Structure formats: structure tokens, C-alpha cells
Amino acid sequence: MNKHNGELEIDEDAPFEKRFWTVQRIGWLIMLLVILAAMFGFTGRGGLSGINKIKKASQSQSLVLEYDRFQRYQVSDKLTVKLQQLQTTAPTITFSKVFYEKIRVEQVVPQPEKVEINANEITYTFSISQPSGDVIFYTKPMHAGSLEVMVKGPNNERVPISMFVYP
Amino acid sequence: MNKHNGELEIDEDAPFEKRFWTVQRIGWLIMLLVILAAMFGFTGRGGLSGINKIKKASQSQSLVLEYDRFQRYQVSDKLTVKLQQLQTTAPTITFSKVFYEKIRVEQVVPQPEKVEINANEITYTFSISQPSGDVIFYTKPMHAGSLEVMVKGPNNERVPISMFVYP
Amino acid sequence: MDTIFRGAIIYIFLLIIFRISGKRTLYDATLFDFVLLLIIAETTQQALLGDDFSIVNGLLLIITLIFMDICLSLIKQKFKSFGKVVDGTSLILLDNGKLLTERMKKERVDEGDILESARALHGLEHLSQIKYAILEKDGKITIIPKEKAS
Amino acid sequence: MDTIFRGAIIYIFLLIIFRISGKRTLYDATLFDFVLLLIIAETTQQALLGDDFSIVNGLLLIITLIFMDICLSLIKQKFKSFGKVVDGTSLILLDNGKLLTERMKKERVDEGDILESARALHGLEHLSQIKYAILEKDGKITIIPKEKAS
């Protein structure tokens, strides 16, 4: 043990503490940055559109997807599929493998007429009598990390979506 | 009370404490072993394939099951049934009694056309138009201990699966 | 975004409610008070988290709460009067042997509480052995004994 | 596997965030600070458990946290400098009657805090009765009074 003033035995290390104050202040700054990032939506659950709330359309605008880019492990979210210019009353929406392997679809509104999984794809068939209609998928990611899903609309148009799931 | 140095009254028992230090170190080692076992997947929720993540197929490969061997009481999990070389568009998957008595099936994707329970079996009938298809059962074990389920595919092929549910 | 707002709202709400309720409310004089404090913390936690049990949610909330606390302490340091509003000040309850009954009544402290502190901190028997008794910011009562020799 | 990682991540995260936030942040000077601490503990608990309420999950988490703490203490014992980084050191705030205001400012301690500790620990009335005031690793302020006889 050091002796301070030749009498007080103490493990003080003032130069170290002084250097650590700088580290502390940097830490506070990082905390502030994390909070700002969260406010902008980089950590999911709300935030600015364009950062978290993503709207992505196929070239012909007949398939529009609205989803959250940043999601959280086992926290329910939703994916809205807007179908336009429908040429069939039994449109299909097809997702690649990740959508049923790493995500749990809890509910689909409206309820699909038929669901089939094969050849690394899941296909939902709906019954829509009008030329346009929305479908909402209530999803829950069951896997942390980035997820890449390919969505295929009724006219075989493809829209890739990518999400990041926080643990 | 003992008297230390003839003055300090204290309930010290140094030889006992010394022996106990050894017990402590052994305890630490056991904790390390438990943590390693958990990392390898022996306690469920992730882990190496082969230890927790099991893939089991029937002889002809027409029925493949993917499931977690180690599950936890009332924690959702899933069982994926891969059907191949289908000769019918209305394949059935049949499970033995345990599957509906000790496990709660929360959701089946795709939704079955028909479900029937009889003669100690539960039979799910699906509508699959292509020669192969996957079915996902979202399950929640409602019983701790080991569970033995017999799964029967559309061609009457049997695959037994055994799971252990931690309390 | 949602997470940060939840954290901030609950932080400010608790700050106000604890300040308003007074120093001695919920001060763990009995086990019951202590349990009550625990229950309040538990209840708050549920309101904070909702049904989002992800790690990132927990970590964001902790960062929010601690960051707000650091900011509050920096503001308190800069503006002393703000610190007074937030934390309150110490308050003399027993002044040179004289009980200040009006203050004690307002702060809901009685002679027994002062004697309890006197016993716990200095092993004193009577009020007459106490020079000052002070109600601290955290609800504790500190005691300055009279010098014996004098 | 998942359980162990959750435990480890949160252990390390908390270790860092508490170290960075400073000794006096969340030090329970007021009841509000105490409740904040409890809330942080609770919030962590949910992030740890998720929606897995099985016994084995709870036991694994407890083992992970305690095991990491044992490891940390063993490492700290072996490498003193690592201990310094993790725990910090004690810091003299009042040196032989002289207040070290720069240090007090950085650590967010004021005269009132030192006096409160002096009252609580030794029943002292003035700063002049204090020889040393030391900010300990846990945020407490300890007091070494001046000898009277001299």
C-alpha cells in the first residue's frame, strides 16, 4: 500500500483516475449516440420512415411491401403486402425459405385460402374479388441476425427485403 | 464461545473452513462443466446439431423430421416435417398419443385440411399439390420429462422421436 | 424510439413522485416499507418493458435510465438551486438539545425515530445526549452527540 | 447455449456501463436512486429470461452470472492492474483539511455530501474536524476525523 502524507495508507491512484475520467466522458458520449440512434429508429420499434419503416415496391407498383427493417428477437411485428392491378381473383404471395424457417408467421389477415411449402418457398394463395387488396402478415422473428427474404407477387414480380433482428 | 489469544470471543473454526475451500473449488469446476454442457446444447435452446438439433429420416427418405432433442417446459419450439416423393395430394401425418396429451400444438403451417384424434393417434391431413412439401408444427411441451412420439408419414413409414423436456 | 421514450417518461415520473411523497415515505424503517419499494420497482419494470423481452430492449432501457441520471447529476452540479428542488436539503430536527416539533410534524418524524438513530449510530440513551439531529436527503436521521468531557 | 450467451452479454454490459457511469451515479443518496437501481436490476432480469420461464433457464442464468463473477474476481486477484480498470481506486477528496475541488467536481461530489458522511459516520459538525475524506470504490465517502487531543 502507498502512504499518503506518510500516514494514510490508501490504494489511491490519482493519475489513473484522472485518465479514467476521460474514458468516462467518452462513454457518456457513446451512450448519447446510442440513444440518438434508437430515437431515429436504428434499434427497431418505431423511428423515422426510411430508417426503420421501409416501403418497397416492384417496378410496376403492383406489389408494395411495408415492413420494419430493424426487428427484435421474439417481438411481434407486421409486414403489409399491398397488391394492385390484380389480374386474378386467386393471387399468390410467395416467400423464400427464411420466411418460414427463421420467422414465425403468427397470423395472416385475410386468412389465406391455401398455404404450401415446397422447393424452398412458402406460397400463400388468397381469394380477393377486387383488383387490389392488402394482406397483413403478423410475424415474430425466431432468429437473431440479418434475414434476407425474397417476396414474389402474383405476376411473378420479385421484391427482396432485408431485415436485421436484434437479439 | 472459543477464546482466541485468551481474549477474543469468536466462533472461528479454521480447519473446517480450510476443508471447505476444497469443496468450493470442486463446486466451481461443476459450474464450468454445466456451462460447457449448456454451450454444446445439452440444455436446449440452440447448440450443436447432433446434440440438440436432430434430423431424422425414414428409410426411403420420404419422411424427414427436424426437431430439438432438449426442450424446456412451456417454451415454444418447432418440429419440421419434410415430406418427399408424395404419391397423393392429401398426405397425412400421424402422431402417437403423447403428441396431443403432453404437448400443445400452437400452430401448424400450412393449416391442415383436417385433424382427427382416434385410437391413441392424432392425424393431420394436408392438401399439397406438389410431390414434396414441408409442414411446421409449433409446439409447446406441457409436461416435463422424456417424451417418446411415434410419427407416421403418408406411406405408413414410422419414425420414432424422443425428446427430453427440462422443467 | 419507443423504448427510449418509455424510459424517459418513467424516469421523470418516478423522480417527481418520490420527491412529492416526502423523504420519510417509503424510507425503509420497517420491512414492509422495503417490500413496498421492491414492489414499486417491479411494477415499473413491467411498464417499461411491455412484452418486449429482447436483450436490446433491456440494454437500451438501462442506458436511457443511467444516461438521464448522469445528465440530472450534471445539471444539479451546475445549478445548485435545481439540485435543491430535485433532492431537497438536509433539515435540522433537533437543534442544540431543542426538538423542532413543527418540522418533525411536517416531515412525519417523531422522537422515537431520532432516538432509534441515536442508539444505532452512537449508542446514546437520552435525547439530552444529542446535540443535533439532522434529517438527511435520503430520509435517514444523523446524530451529532454532545461532547461528554465538556 | 442461448441462455449462457445472454447471461454473459448482460454481465459484461452491466460491468462496463456501471464503470463508465461513475462511482456516484446511482449511488443511493436518495430513495429515488435506490428505486432506480432496483428497476435496472428488474429490467435486466427480463432481458435475461425472455419468455423462457423454465426452471432450467433460471438455474443456468444464475450459474452463468455467478461463475463469471468468480472468474472476474480470480482475474482481478491475479492482475492488479485489471482490478484497477474494473473497480477503480479510492480517491482522496479532502486532504488534511483541504478540499480537492477539481476531483470533487469530476466525481460529482459536493461539500454537503462530505458533511453528510461526517455526520453519519462520526457525528462530526464541521469540515475542520475532518482530516481525510475518501471516495471509496462503491461511491461511499469515508471520513478520517482529526485527533482531538493534539
Image: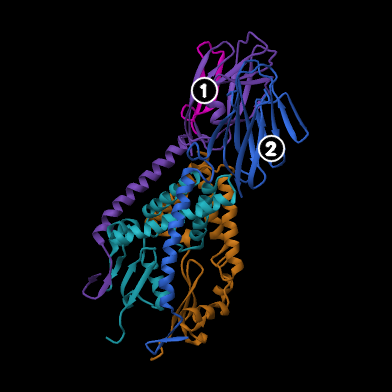
Chain colours: A purple, B blue, C orange, D cyan
Residue type for callout 1: Lys
* Foreground residue among C111 and B50: B50
Q: Quadrant of residue B103?
A: top right
* Amino acid on which the number 2 mark rests in the picture: Phe
Q: Residue at x 55, y 26 (%)?
A: A99
**Who's the residue at 44% across and 65% down the image?**
B23
In three-dimensional space, the C-alpha distance between marks 2 and 1, rounded to whole angstroms, equals: 42 Å
Q: Residue furthest front?
A: B59
Image spot of residue B42 (x, y percent): 51, 45
The foreground one among C38 and A115 is: A115
The residue that appears at 38% across and 51% down in the rendered structure is D16
- Tell me, yes or no, whether the highlighted magenta stretch contains residue A136: no
How many numbered tags mark residues here? 2
The residue where tag 1 is placed is: A55
- Pick the residue in front: B34 or C57: B34
Q: Quadrant of residue D84?
A: bottom left
Decide if residue C31 is on the left or right side of residue C95: right
- Residue identifier under label 2: B99
The residue most toward the bottom is: C149
Badge 1 density bin: few <14, some 14–19, many ≥20, Cα 10 Å: some
Dot 1 falls on which chain? A
Q: Chain of mark 2?
A: B
Q: Secondary structure at mark 2?
A: helix
The correct choice, above or below, for C100 with respect to A140 in the image is below
Residue B99 location (% of width, % of height): 69, 37
Specify start and end residues of the magenta stretch as a single range: A47-69
Label 1 sits on a secondary structure element that is strand
10 Å neighbourhood of mark 2: few (<14), some, or many (≥20)?
many
Q: Position of residue B125 (x, y in %)?
A: 71, 24
